Image (cartoon, rainbow, N blue to C red):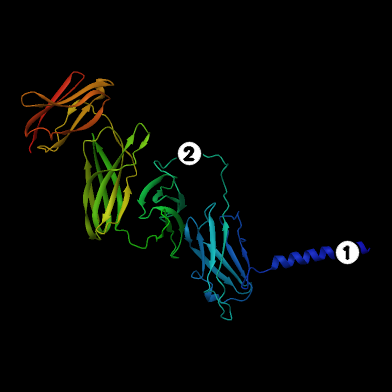
Amino acid sequence: MKNLFLKLAILIACFLNAAIIYSTPINQYISSVTPTQNAVSVNKSSNITIVFTQDMNPATINNANIMVFGYQTGLLPVTIDYNQVNKTANINPNQELKAGEKVSVTLTSGIRTISNSNISPFVYTFYVQAIGGNGIFTSTSSIDNVLNAVIKSGDIDMDGDIDLIVNNRIYLNNGNAGFIFSNELSVSGIPELADFDNDGDIDIAIGDYSGNSVGILLNGDIPLPVELTSFTSETETNNVTLNWTTSSEENNAGYDVERSMFNVQTSMFNDNWIKAGFVSGKDTTGNSNSYTFTDKNLQSGKYKYRLKQSDYNGNFKYYELSNEVVIGVPDKFYLSQNYPNPFNPSTNLGFGISSAAGGLGFVSLKVYDVLGNEVAVLVNETKEPGYYNVQFDGSSLSSGIYFYRLESNGQVQTKRMMMVK
């Protein structure tokens, strides 16, 4: 019998101890939170509940003093109500939480008790449960030409999908896990993301590689100098025309038009973008403006285009064309007129070898003076059908008339050009 009483006493003590542990408040003002602190499998539709230890001033239980922040989505819009009977704040996110995301809940000292005492600031975190996947991964896209990548993710442009910061370059998500280069940060280093100024968007802290400083870059606090509403391309033979439209512009100096060509040897686009031209901006205007630029006499291949929009203070932003541009092969043999013409001391010569000739063919492009003397050999090799461009440098020659002659597969064309020094 004594042993039975002893066992019952121990069992009751254990229950009481567990009850005491369970009911131990988190701090002087907060009794418990749901989801619990550091929970790792929170349902994406969950509400958040804060139970206080004492009566609170309902007027201070609001969005200014309670904030829910997703580490990838930024400040989350929530609806908050306070139940005075249960001393409970119910926080209902207006959108589902993002699977796998870390979420923090912040209670500021602006919350006051019914006796008008300010609470101690309190922050806790939890993780949203991933609800799918089988652990088998499929490669769908890539960001090429990246060395020693330091990667951070977050909804940079607040459009509901997760973007990437790779070193100091921002890649925006098209919504299907395809990433398009947007712009380059003014500081190179290791990035960290958070809403540093509590305005609801994701800002960036980036540690300089030299270790001397940390740059704080606030998101969206300076109006974009240009609001681009469309950016499209059209192709005619080996010429590409780019068209873009803006809804407004501020301090806009203009646009460098840049292109990158697909490298067949590396099976990727070249990382060094080449400036194809410049188009002046409209300075400051609230009106819609349309722009056009034609990139002429391109070689056969695949190209990417982007605009580097700059203001008069030296700030810039990139806008990348969403599609690749393909230049095919000509349907006939041709030699184009050189440009510029007259020239001093160099000029460009374009020619096309058609597929009708059938595969590889020997191509010769030579320059002659008015007496018929050969003065330069520009091409003398086997080439595939396609569009080609070569540059002729006449700096060692005197002013005058010259002829350039193209031969391939029994076909010949000759044109005249003038050098003026």
Q: Is residue 395 above or below residue 150?
A: above
Quickly name the residue at label 2: 139
| Residue 168 drawn at (x, y percent) | 39, 51
What's under tag 1, amino acid-wise? Answer: Leu
| Residue 313 drawn at (x, y percent) | 26, 59
Determine the image quadrant of residue 379.
Answer: top left
Q: Is residue 380 left or right of residue 217?
A: left
Q: Is residue 188 left or right of residue 389?
A: right
| Residue 216 drawn at (x, y percent) | 41, 61
Determine the image quadrant of residue 126.
Answer: bottom right
Q: Is residue 94 visible?
A: no
| Residue 312 drawn at (x, y percent) | 24, 58
Residue at x 27%, y 49% (from the top left corner): 244
**Quarter holding the C terminus?**
top left
The front one of 197 and 281 is 197
Determine which of the numbered discs, if any, sits on residue 6 in the image. Answer: 1
Say few, some or many: other residues with alpha carbon within 10 Å of mark 2 (under 14 / 14 to 19 / 20 or more): few
